[in-house]
């Protein structure tokens, strides 16, 4: 018998490479997620409910703004710790990880990185406790993968800016107290504008955030629009320095990193549930787990999960050492979410008819991961980011034939050349 | 009151485990704070929060058990003592008690709390033996703990009911996991625990007087008996006869 037993949940023992603090954070996040979130996830997903007490609970646990400095209410912990928390939340439901990702990476991170001292003091402590909810407005109805072509504008007026336009597919927007909104800031009507970040607060005149109904995925997360009709945003609510797509892309880089970890949790949950199911379910007089087809499916799942775990762990370690690169994040987000989606589909299949029902939970992961595969850079867009890295040629805008067609004459979108490497 | 809570690390019961060739194989290798000890820590923290005082946690274990000590500090304990034993040391209850008694002999703790038993062995020996070694009055299987001046008021779960016992300090109480729901350390607690004092003492445990020679799985339940037939009344009659005559259940 080998001295070291084989760990069927963590085959290459990646958890043993974590530091003591990271393991404690992982255990606390797991205890919270399993004891408090898991019992509500079925109702949340089936009935489209985001329980309103969850932000405060997460705040109490310290799960919001994990990497934010302690003086602003964060924990000042590592990127690895942040990733481990994302894994535990998404083990229950991608919706809960989405909430925490938006609050931490897309709202608290930019306020800490780009905000004024006054903005940090005003928003960060309340966002950390969950007393305030944040959202992030970049995507527009006609501008998803190509945010550089956004049409939301902010026109300079006396004492501030007037926002006009709309954002779509915005996690948390109907319940958010503050939104980090990216818009083309124009000094005058003829100015082509430059992308800047604005802090739009609930109750500002002309600002509405209607809810998006009938989502078939991420149903335990609230999604909506942000509509700006001559919304006056005072100068005090504008990020002073950051210009261009670098700002939102730095935020997305952090959130995508968390997603790469979250997908590990969702995949692990599907694998564990499928493994348990095939050991209990008997057909033809034998457990499903005794059948060759089923065993190789489990073996494939564990092999893929092991790769996902090691990829996520290594990426976190590199980011903590200041050696991360945004293309590493693209690689990990693309691989881990795409693979998790495949695993969820196979797990659903292994559970037969039972896998169709919500009680077995795997189908929730499966449909959630469809969104996760699309948002924060689709699977294909991350392929193109890597493709550009590999060839030096951007392929976001198809070159096609020189003609008067729409695509051929469009200027290449502002791509993330300037994104910081970590 | 000053509390000293004895804690230790056990294998995670939620992780896969199996018995092979008489040896216990813990596949995941995951270890956690013992659930009964966690309730003891929680009880001490609650009394500290309502009445003031201090909570020290004392752990006997190898180097890797330091993580469990830190978890108790992250929950809110003020300081910790790690009685460090070699990785391969196999201690029995007597050896554990000897180490704890040596450390707590001169302790000014008003109350020593332990779990009522350990989650892995279910032996339930350390609390009583430690009280005897220290000459402290003690109560076992507490499901409730209140403070009244210099005394503790302990609600003890018995077989047929509960006893409420006044226990003057200095004393010792063994705690049930039915007593409370131990808090999950939040990130602030985890980060703050780094700054809390931990004293590590290299301990020399006695050779164990008893040792576990093998492990075995509990015997499998025998398959049940299926009563079949087309006539419901006849099936019910057979069932009643079997339950009455064979199973003697009715």
Image (spheres, rainbow, N blue to C red):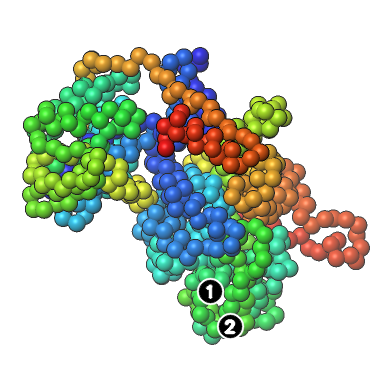
Q: Please rate how many residues cluster around mark 1, counting C-alpha atoms within 10 Å: few if below 14, some from 14 to 19, many from 20.
A: many
Query: For residue A349, which quarter of the picture?
Result: top right
**Residue B246 visible (yes or no):** yes
Q: Tell whether B229 sits left or right of B147.
A: right
Residue B3 in the image: x percent, y percent? Answer: 17, 43
Instruction: Judge by depth and name the residue closer to the eye, B150 or A155.
Output: B150
A150 over B176 or under it: above or below: below
Q: Residue at x 42, y 42 (%)?
A: A27
User: Image height check: is A179 above or below A164?
Assistant: above
Image location of residue A215, percent across then percent down: 66, 63
Circle 1 chain:
A
- Measure the alpha-carbon separation of dots 1 and 2: 11 Å
The residue at the point 37 percent across, 36 percent down is: B32
Query: Which numbered disc covers residue A206?
Result: 2
Mark 2 burial class by Cα count in 10 Å: few <14, some 14-19, many 20+: some
Q: Position of residue A176 (x, y in %)?
A: 52, 69
Residue at the location (67% across, 28% down)?
A285
Which residue carries the number 1 mark? Answer: A200
């Amino acid at each position: 018998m080998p001295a070291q037993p084989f760990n069927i949940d963590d085959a290459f023992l990646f958890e043993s490479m974590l530091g003591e603090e990271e393991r404690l954070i992982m255990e606390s996040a797991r205890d919270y997620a399993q004891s408090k979130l898991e019992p509500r996830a079925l109702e949340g997903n089936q009935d489209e409910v985001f329980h309103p007490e969850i932000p405060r609970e997460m705040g109490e646990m310290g799960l919001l703004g994990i990497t934010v400095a302690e003086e602003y209410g964060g924990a000042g912990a590592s990127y690895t710790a942040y990733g481990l928390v994302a894994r535990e939340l998404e083990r229950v439901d991608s919706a809960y990880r989405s909430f925490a990702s938006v609050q931490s990476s897309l709202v608290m991170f930019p306020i800490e990185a780009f905000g004024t001292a006054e903005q940090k003091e005003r928003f960060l402590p309340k966002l950390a406790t969950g007393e305030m909810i944040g959202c992030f407005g970049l995507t527009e109805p006609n501008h998803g993968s190509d945010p550089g072509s956004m049409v939301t504008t902010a026109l300079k007026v006396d004492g501030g800016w007037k926002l006009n336009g709309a954002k779509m597919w915005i996690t948390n927007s109907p319940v958010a107290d503050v939104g980090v909104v990216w818009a083309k800031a124009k000094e005058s009507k003829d100015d082509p504008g430059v992308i800047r970040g604005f802090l739009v607060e609930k109750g500002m005149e002309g600002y509405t955030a209607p809810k998006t109904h009938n989502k078939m995925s991420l149903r335990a997360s609230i999604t909506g629009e942000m509509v700006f009709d001559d919304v006056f945003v005072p100068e005090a609510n504008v990020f002073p320095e950051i210009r261009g797509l670098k700002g939102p892309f730095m935020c997305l880089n952090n959130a995508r990193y968390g997603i790469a970890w979250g997908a590990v949790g969702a995949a692990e949950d599907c694998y564990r549930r499928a493994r348990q199911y095939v050991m209990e379910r008997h057909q033809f007089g034998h457990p499903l787990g005794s059948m060759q087809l089923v065993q190789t499916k489990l073996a494939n799942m564990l092999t893929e999960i092991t790769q996902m775990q090691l990829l996520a762990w290594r990426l976190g370690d590199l980011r903590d050492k200041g050696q991360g690169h945004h293309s590493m994040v693209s690689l990990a987000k693309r691989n881990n979410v795409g693979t998790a989606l495949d695993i969820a589909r196979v797990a659903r299949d292994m559970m037969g008819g039972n896998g169709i029902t919500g009680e077995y939970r795997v189908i929730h992961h499966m449909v959630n991961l469809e969104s996760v595969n699309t948002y924060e850079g689709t699977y294909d867009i991350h392929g193109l980011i890597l493709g550009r890295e590999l060839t030096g040629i951007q392929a976001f805008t198809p070159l096609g034939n020189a003609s008067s067609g729409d695509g051929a004459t469009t200027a290449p979108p502002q791509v993330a050349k300037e994104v910081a490497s970590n | 009151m000053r509390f000293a809570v004895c804690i230790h690390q056990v294998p995670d019961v939620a992780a896969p485990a199996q018995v092979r060739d008489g040896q216990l194989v813990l596949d995941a290798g995951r270890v956690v704070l013992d659930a009964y000890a966690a309730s003891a820590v929680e009880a001490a923290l609650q009394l500290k929060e309502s009445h003031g005082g201090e909570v020290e946690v004392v752990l006997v274990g190898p180097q890797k058990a330091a993580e469990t000590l830190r978890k108790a500090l992250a929950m809110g304990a003020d300081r910790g003592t790690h009685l460090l034993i070699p990785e391969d040391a196999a201690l029995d209850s007597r050896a554990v008690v000897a180490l704890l008694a040596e450390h707590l002999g001169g302790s000014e703790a008003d109350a020593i709390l332990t779990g009522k038993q350990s989650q892995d062995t279910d032996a339930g020996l350390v609390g009583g033996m430690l009280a005897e070694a220290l000459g402290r009055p003690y109560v076992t299987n507490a499901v409730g703990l209140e403070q009244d001046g210099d005394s503790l008021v302990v609600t003890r779960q018995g077989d047929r009911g509960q006893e409420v016992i006044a226990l003057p300090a200095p004393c010792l109480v063994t705690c049930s996991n039915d007593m409370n729901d131990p808090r999950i350390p939040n990130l602030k607690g985890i980060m703050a625990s780094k700054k809390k004092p931990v004293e590590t003492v290299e301990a020399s445990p006695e050779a164990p007087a008893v040792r576990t020679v093998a492990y075995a799985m509990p015997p499998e339940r025998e398959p049940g008996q299926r009563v079949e037939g087309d006539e419901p009344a006849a099936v019910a009659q057979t069932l009643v006869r079997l339950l009455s005559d064979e199973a003697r259940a009715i």
